[in-house]
Amino acid sequence: MANGIVRVGLVGAGGNTRLRHAPGLRAQDGVEIVSVANRSRESGERFAGEFEIPKVYDNWVDLINADDTDAICIGTWPYMHRTLTLAALAADKHVLCEARMAMNAKEAHDMLDASRLKPNLVAQIVPAPSTLDVDATIQGLIADGYLGEILAIKLRVSNTEGRANRNETFADTDAPFHWRQNQLLSGYNAMSMGIWYEQLMRYVGPASKVSAMTKVCVKQRLDENGVLRAVSVPDHINVLCQMACGAQAELSWSSVSGLQKGNELWLLGTEGTLNLRGAPNVLYGGRKGDDELAEIPIPPEKKGAWRVEEEWINAIRGEEQITRTPFDVGVQYMEFTEAVARSSQTGQAISLPL
Amino acid sequence: MPDEEIRVGLMGAGGNVRNRHIPGFQGVKDLSIVAVANRSIESGRAIADQFNIPQVYSDWRELLDDESINAVCIGTWPYMHLTMTKAALEKGKHVLTEARMASTAEEAREMLRLSHRHPDLVTMLTPTSTAYRVDRVIRGMLDESYFGELLSVEVHALQTGFADRMGNLHWRHDWEMSGYNTLNIGAQYETMSSWLGRATRVMAMGKTHVPYRKNGSGEIVSVGIPDHLDVMYELAAGAQVHMRFSATTGLSTGNQIWMYGTEGTIHIGPGAAIFAGRRGDSQLTEVPNPEDQRAGYRVEEEFTNAIRGLEQVKHNSFEIGVHYMEWTEAVARSAQTGQSVYLPL
């Protein structure tokens, strides 16, 4: 930091960097986005023009090693997260890494280990964003005993990412091969599995055993060059978990469930039931003795929001600890993600941690 | 025996026998219910008085020795089905057995083998009663290839009460009485497989949320049969199914089925309401299921028609029972071992 200014370099400037990180960083006092390196110099220059970034690099190696940079925001697809994170930490730069954390559990562990070798640096993963408004309320209800002992969990997610038309819910055979469907770029990550598992962990903690079945319903897609590619990332996933908290969870993600819209999470206990439906999120609950579920209002003071860039900069300045999301939590969801893949490959339950 | 009178003996006379089989038999021409044997002679006599059954036996073996009886209805809990079926067939009597078929897959297979040894006798299982109301509509949609290619299925068989800690022990909680049968999993699979075909691979997880219950004598006993069960399976036709069964899901949404295909979705809600939609639709809409066009309950009619050579047993043959008992056992084995279990066993 020179004169208290945090100087940030962007590696990879895709959708979320444009939508969230670049505006979020510019909104912080004492932060300068000093550089960007994207897949091509042209796309980097376009981005630099849009956000008034003075320097465009041809490659990330030079950007990460530049002396005038304190912190690196990694916005690439997962296949580069480990390489970039290790290089940035080795160059003594703070890291904010886009989610999902890595391709697999081993890479996530490498990243966690590397961050522990540099305790003076901040290492943060972009958090799962879809329940930030309701997290504190749900956590508070559970802590106050609303559910009693948690017995069962259900999560059902209708996935819209990678669709040609997000209003279409049937199997989409026309959409092009998306990077999320490309195992070489996304690793074991599939649909919003890691996002929702991270969110679920905020309420009930991690799983101790995972059984999964997955299916690729749309098996071939055209890539941007018109080449027909085989798809190995599943578009329908069923997971059963034994949770460390004692509950049994049943989690599903699907891009092929026609006319099934939105997401629903059920937390079922001995004394009460919570049901989160979205998006937008609406929380319902009921307790023993009630006839039906009723909406639970979210108190304004408990309504969380996106503050990723603020948290990162505050942490760099020593003003707060990273809670959304530290690397060790990233390791947990990458272990879950890999357990799902391994279980679906082998047909056996996989115990966690790996 | 087209012209002969059918003379039925009841072995076990629980709720379903009183509510369904006895009235059903009473509606069949040239048929008499001639005897009953229940757990006690007193309970047998009460049934006999209520339904004008002339003979009460204190023991089911005496009933089978009665040469005037040519068909039996076995209404006990699953643990006796094999033993009674074997004895009845050996005495030359037609057999209608209450569901679930047996305690284990091997018992079910033995019953099937015994039926093959007696091709002159009719053997039949009581089918599940949950699907009648929607069966014709769903079959009609399947015949029209409503789904395109079926991709995935989601089934909820959820009770809506909270966990009944220290509740009463029911025979369905008792492994000795029920074997691998758990909640109503066999009935759900029977229905789903009648529409969509059989499973090839099963993975399951189960929990017993109420681990102790009070038996009839007020003693606290440990319960081994799960009261919460998740099952995933692959269909021979390729689709992936998830079923959740639970007696502890308070304020949940109850019993529901969703079936998703490449071109269409069918949803069966509580109360047998059917909703469906195809690609291009903006939402599911209700499919008419007029009461007068729904399939009816005709178990005793089918059984007696089969005895008279007027039709073949379809709902259910012993083969169907073997299929659902193998699946039921596969669920239990997978839940025990954490491994996939492949079918047939």
Image (spheres, grey):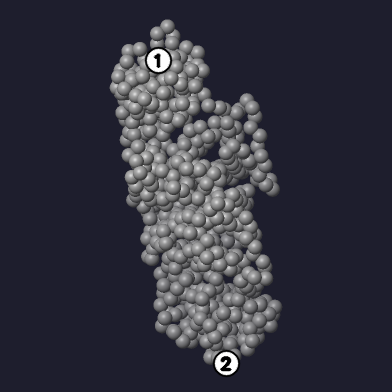
Taking the spot 46% from the left edge, 26% from the top edge, the residue there is: A18
Q: Which residue is mark 1?
A: A54
Q: Residue pushed farthest top?
A: A3
- Density class for disc 1 (Cα within 10 Å; few <14, some 14-19, many ≥20) is few
What is the spatial separation of the Cα atoms under label 1 and label 2, in whole angstroms?
A: 100 Å
**Residue B175: percent from the left, percent from the top?**
49, 62
Q: Chain of mark 2?
A: B
Total number of numbered discs in the rendering = 2
**Residue B154: percent from the left, percent from the top?**
51, 54
Q: Residue pushed farthest bottom?
A: B3
Q: Which residue is mark 2?
A: B4
**Residue A121: percent from the left, percent from the top?**
38, 18
Which image quadrant is residue B345 in? bottom left
- Density class for disc 2 (Cα within 10 Å; few <14, some 14-19, many ≥20) is few
SS label for mark 2 = loop
Residue in front for this viewpoint, B219 or A154: A154
Taking the spot 38% from the left edge, 24% from the top edge, the residue there is: A44
Q: Is residue A56 above or below residue B151?
A: above
Say if residue B340 shows up in the picture. Answer: yes
Q: Is A6 displayed left or right of B304 in the figure?
A: left
